[in-house]
Amino acid sequence: EAGVTQSPTHLIKTRGQQATLRCSPISGHTSVYWYQQALGLGLQFLLWYDEGEERNRGNFPPRFSGRQFPNYSSELNVNALELEDSALYLCASRGRGYSNQPQHFGDGTRLSIL
Amino acid sequence: GIQVEQSPPDLILQEGANSTLRCNFSDSVNNLQWFHQNPWGQLINLFYIPSGTKQNGRLSATTVATERYSLLYISSSQTTDSGVYFCADTRDYKLSFGAGTTVTVRA
């Protein structure tokens, strides 16, 4: 069974540009989570999508947005990039429904802002 | 939100040594997970352990939900065990992570 896949592995952008990160969940998983791991700030929750809807978002500005497609894959968009957006972005998926289940992570996208 | 405290922050081990990592929570434990982040940034699931004890090879974990803590045991450590170990619990369907324990295993 394929795990959570993320693309691209690395992304280099300049300030003010837009970045798009992609995530494909484990087959059968309907929930997708995005987390940011910036240097010195730990792992912070960004967004949660389930069944195509945004269910919750962390304490991040509106220029962080995303969506979930009918096949449950997800996209994270970051507009007007700032230097502090440089981080490892991790996507996780979880099984169907709201029952308590573990989250499984992809290998991440490392975003560098020049 | 829930506060997650991990100790120790750093751990240096000689290959073959045993160690214990701890997570304390400010509230009752729901769905605790332990992860290992390797030097390449990959976050690998070690245990999903809301309560009780589980073992997987040289690693084992114990969660005492009523006392709001969990322990991760590493036995006979190897250099490949190096990295950052995180515990996290679920609140409002999202994971809240501790700051991690950085483990360095020396040959």
Image: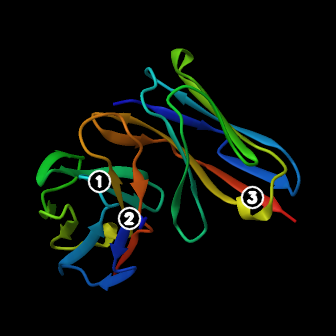
**Residue A9 x/y as whole percent:** 40, 79
**Residue A107 x/y as whole percent:** 45, 68
Give the residue type that dot 2 points to.
Answer: Val
Count of numbered badges drawn on the protein:
3
Give the labeled residue for mark 1: A29
Indicate whether B23 appears above or below B27: below
Mark 3 belongs to chain: B
Indicate whether A111 appears above or below A43: below
Disc on res. B104:
3
Quadrant including the N terminus of chain A? bottom left
Give the labeled residue for mark 2: A4
Q: Residue at x 12, y 55 (%)?
A: A52
State how far apart marks 2 and 1 are (Cα).
10 Å
Is residue B35 rendered to the left or right of residue A35? right
Q: Residues within 10 Å of mark 3 (few under 14, many from 20)?
A: many
Residues at marks 2 and 1 on the same chain:
yes
Quadrant including the C terminus of chain A? bottom left
Is residue B88 rendered to the left or right of residue A55? right
State how far apart marks 1 and 3 are (Cα).
34 Å
Q: Earlier in the sequence, mark 2 or mark 1?
A: 2
- Give SS at disc 2: loop
Q: Residue at x 36, y 50 (%)?
A: A44
Is residue B18 rendered to the left or right of residue B11? right
Give the residue type that dot 3 points to.
Answer: Thr
Which of pointers 2 and 1 indicates the residue nearer the eye?
1
